[in-house]
Image (cartoon, grey):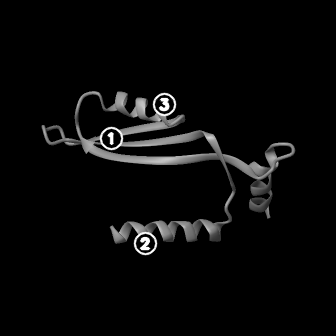
């Protein structure tokens, strides 16, 4: 019962007065590439061109040699697009469709 009450209190649709069920589109972009100078500046330029706002950025380096790889996780918000919240079943259908599409390539 306490869990349901907490979920009701933290429901993003209920927090805005007169909410229409729309929310900004949030994306998680994951990149793995060989280590090189200037990667962050390239990311910043691309994100600015696409009108994406960086919410969080995490960078991990794997290895200390010339063949080191850098993994970058970018959490961004699209400033131009709002989407309707999906129910969990809808999210699963989208996830499975994307997974099948990736397996075909």
Hey, which quadrant is residue 71 in on the image? top left
Which residue position holds label 2?
100
Mark 2 is surrounded, within 10 Å at the Cα level, by few (under 14), some (14 to 19) or many (20 or more) other residues, namely few
Residue at 74% x, 60% y is 3
Secondary structure under badge 3? helix
Residues at badges 2 and 3 in contact (C-beta under 8 Å)?
no
Whole-percent x, y for residue 10 in the image: 75, 50
Residue 56 visible at all: yes
Residue at 58% x, 41% y is 78
Residue 60's disc number: 1
Residue at 13% x, 38% y is 65
Whole-percent x, y for residue 56 in the image: 50, 37
CA gap between label 3 and label 1 equals 22 Å
Of callouts 3 and 1, which one flags the residue occurring earlier in the amino acid sequence? 3
Relative depth, front residue between 49 and 71: 49
Relative depth, front residue between 52 and 59: 52
Secondary structure under badge 1? strand
Which residue position holds label 3?
48
Mark 1 is surrounded, within 10 Å at the Cα level, by few (under 14), some (14 to 19) or many (20 or more) other residues, namely few
Secondary structure under badge 2? helix
Hey, which quadrant is residue 91 in on the image? bottom right
Residue 32 shown left or right of residue 76 in the figure: left
Whole-percent x, y for residue 26 in the image: 57, 46
Residues at badges 3 and 1 in contact (C-beta under 8 Å)?
no
Of callouts 2 and 3, which one flags the residue occurring earlier in the amino acid sequence? 3
Of callouts 1 and 2, which one flags the residue occurring earlier in the amino acid sequence? 1
The quadrant of the picture occupied by the C terminus is bottom left
Residue 10 visible at all: no
Whole-percent x, y for residue 104 in the image: 35, 71
CA gap between label 1 and label 2 equals 28 Å
Mark 3 is surrounded, within 10 Å at the Cα level, by few (under 14), some (14 to 19) or many (20 or more) other residues, namely few
């Amino acid at each position: 019962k306490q869990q349901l009450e907490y979920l009701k209190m933290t429901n993003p649709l209920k927090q805005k007065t007169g909410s229409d069920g729309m929310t900004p589109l949030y994306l998680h972009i994951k990149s793995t590439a060989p280590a090189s100078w200037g990667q962050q500046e390239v990311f910043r330029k691309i994100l600015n061109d696409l009108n994406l706002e960086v919410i969080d950025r995490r960078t991990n380096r794997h290895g200390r040699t010339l063949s080191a790889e850098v993994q970058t996780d970018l959490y961004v918000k699209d400033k131009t697009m709002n989407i309707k919240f999906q129910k969990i079943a809808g999210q699963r259908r989208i996830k499975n469709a994307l997974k099948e599409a990736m397996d075909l390539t």
